[in-house]
Image (cartoon, rainbow, N blue to C red):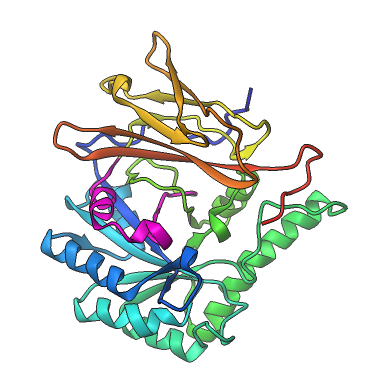
Amino acid sequence: MLAFGVLWSAAQPTSAEASGVFLLYHHIDTTTPAVTSTTPDDFDAHLEWLAVNDFTVWPASKLIAGLRAGSVPERTVAITFDDAYASLLEHAAPKLAARGWPFTLFVATGPIGQRGYLSWADLHEVLKLGGELGNHTASHTHLQRRPPGETRDAWEARVAEEIDGATKALRERLDVTPTLFAYPYGEYSAEVQSIVRAKGLVGFGQQSGAAGMRSDFSVLPRFSLSGVYGKDLDAFATKARTLPLPVRGPLPEPIALEPRPTLLLTFDPDFDPESLACFGPGGRMDIDLDAAGRARIRPVADLPPGRSRYNCTSRTATGRYHWFSQLWIMRRSDGTWLPE
């Protein structure tokens, strides 16, 4: 049985409480790797759908403040980008600026100025176009990985330097001190979360779902819209309109200790878990409900190497979905990390 060590302060919000959706992009291009790219045409279609459907677009920092205050307009999203790819300035930022929409860019500072990435001068332009900048580490490494022979103290110092080094570069080059942090590859562990919390940063993963006023602000969800996930406009519309699944903590450590980890979810008293559907390795997952309304969720196939997720949704009477996603990271049986 896994230890459930990632605590939430209370239940995630119900549909009556403040919530919002964070959208995630990487490349906006047709010439970059498809798995991390959204075409300019698909990106334009996303923006037009948001505009036609009267969505409010806030920078991530403002949406976070609204969630914490319990005051967010209905239909609010934040548009975020990871890695500071050059296509942001060519195909995305000017279009957002033309609509008067802000956005958030998480910068891995080490590659800045290299081929395919923005330069420091470009980042000045990003700020002028309404972008805010967040921390994405210096080298974009897998923070939770501790190589054989590295002590815990050395690992902690290295993780701290990855985060502090990026903050230092952004402060010295752009006079920006970021308060937001995105985990490289969307990967984290309870230990890494603790470091992020201790530095006073709001953290973002790449697990899907909506965020609520009582979400865990050290690992907020975002809907990735790269590759096939950016192609279907109906699917985009569904994600933009999602609500948090009303889950109560605790939640599990994402480092998988067995090939088919069980996810235990406890819900708000007014939520009917009979409407829940969960999908993961092997397809639709088995859900066992106990008398208290708790759900034990287990996949029908082993976790694949590296990252995977369980996605759980519940359709509301109005056709919107409550959505929750749990990240898992699978290691080898000897405890070493699997390759990419």
Magenta-highlighted residues: 219-243
From the viewer's perspective, is 127 left or right of 56?
A: right
Depth check, front residue: 231 or 212: 231
Residue sitting at the far bottom: 121
Considering only vertical position in the picture, is 328 above or below 158?
above
> In percent of the image, x 65 and y 58: which residue is there?
142
> In percent of the image, x 29 and y 83: which residue is there?
94
Considering only vertical position in the picture, is 333 above or below 128?
above
From the viewer's perspective, is 284 left or right of 58?
A: right
Depth check, front residue: 35 or 309: 35
From the viewer's perspective, is 40 left or right of 6?
A: left
Q: Position of residue 225 (x, y in %)?
A: 38, 60
> In percent of the image, x 14 and y 36: which residue is there?
318
Considering only vertical position in the picture, is 282 above or below 228?
above
Q: Position of residue 243 (x, y in %)?
A: 27, 41
> In percent of the image, x 38 and y 83: which residue is there?
89
